[in-house]
Amino acid sequence: MSEVKKIATRASYGNALVELGKKHDDLVVLDADLAAATQTGVFKKEFPERHIDCGIAECNMMGIAAGIATTGKVPFVSSFAMFAAGRAFEQVRNSVGYPHLNVKIGATHAGISVGEDGATHQCNEDIALMRTIPGMTIINPSDDVEAKAAVEAAYEMEGPVYLRFGRLAVPVIKDKPDYKFEIGKGVLLKEGTDVTIVATGLCVGGALEAAEKLAADGINAEVINIHTIKPLDEEIILNSAKKTGKVVVAEEHSVIGGLGSAVCDCLSEKMPTPVCKIGVNDVFGESGPAVKLLEKYGLDAEGIYGKVKGFMGK
């Protein structure tokens, strides 16, 4: 059996910026003294004149990006999710969101898979924060292929975009010639009849593994990848919920305000359906190896499998 290829989506982000930079002279990248970690350093090496290190001043960096956007250039502003969405929230809201400027926020090191950096750096609230900003597009890619496609799609669209990337290397699951990425469109990865698993980010790979284990137990799970949290593809969720009658949402984010909440908002209004939310249960994270943390918080394949079985009463 061939070894599964694993790549961190933060690395995909850096590589995608380089490829975009070769094609588009109006692309500018900003960072806050974290270029090595966010992987924008590879863009800096290739295009030093188009990379701006703003120092440890994330709020100021958002303001600079907003100003650059008014000149017609396309700034990609980069930092850890905790600082890009958390520390700089007011600037993102007022300087980027309110005037609906063409700023792309590349937020890396999201979720508890940041690992040893601990709770202060494990941002499990960023999707919830960004969802509240009118006109903000939110994309949380599941693997290397999807992450690169998301960066290019973000560049091509007009308006603010929040891109969520991880530190942990994750399996490449979209490595197929016919793969197509479209903002706002969910992807049906596996058809099923008994329960729908809606997943985003690194939980997509876990959801697919969980579906295999569930099949061995006689549970036919449908798996949907929602890479765009906002705008949400309500059609794919409603169609699946109508078919299976039960929905499980898996995300490496707080169960409050993330994809689970977005799915519940949709279903409660248009097709009331029992929902089980798998995520970080209103607690802070902790320091530890990323894989062990995902296991402890029930966000790996085994955790998703167990939660779905319990939800199904099996």
Image (cartoon, grey):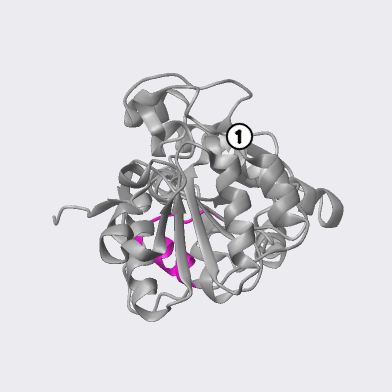
Front residue of 147 and 87 = 87
Left or right: 187 with respect to 213? Answer: right
Q: Residue at x 45, y 19 (%)?
A: 286
The residue carrying pointer 1 sits among few (fewer than 14), some (14 to 19) or many (20 or more) residues within 10 Å by Cα, namely some
Amino acid residing under circle 1: Arg
Q: Residue at x 53, y 33 (%)?
A: 123
Which span is picked out in magenta? 138-152
Q: Circle 1 is placed at which residue position?
A: 87
Magenta-drawn stretch contains 147: yes
Residue 94 vertical placement versus 308 (above, below): below
Give x and y (percent) for residue 261: 71, 43
Give x and y (percent) for residue 71: 61, 71
Magenta: main secondary structure equals: helix
Residue 101 vertical placement versus 179 (above, below): above
Query: Residue 166: in sight, yes or no?
Result: yes
Residue 172 vertical placement versus 213 (above, below): below
Q: Residue at x 51, y 56 (%)?
A: 223
Q: Residue at x 37, y 52 (%)?
A: 9
- Image quarter for residue 137? bottom right
Query: Residue 312: in sight, yes or no?
Result: no
Give x and y (percent) for residue 6: 26, 51
- Quarter of the picture containing the C terminus is top right
Magenta-drawn stretch contains 166: no
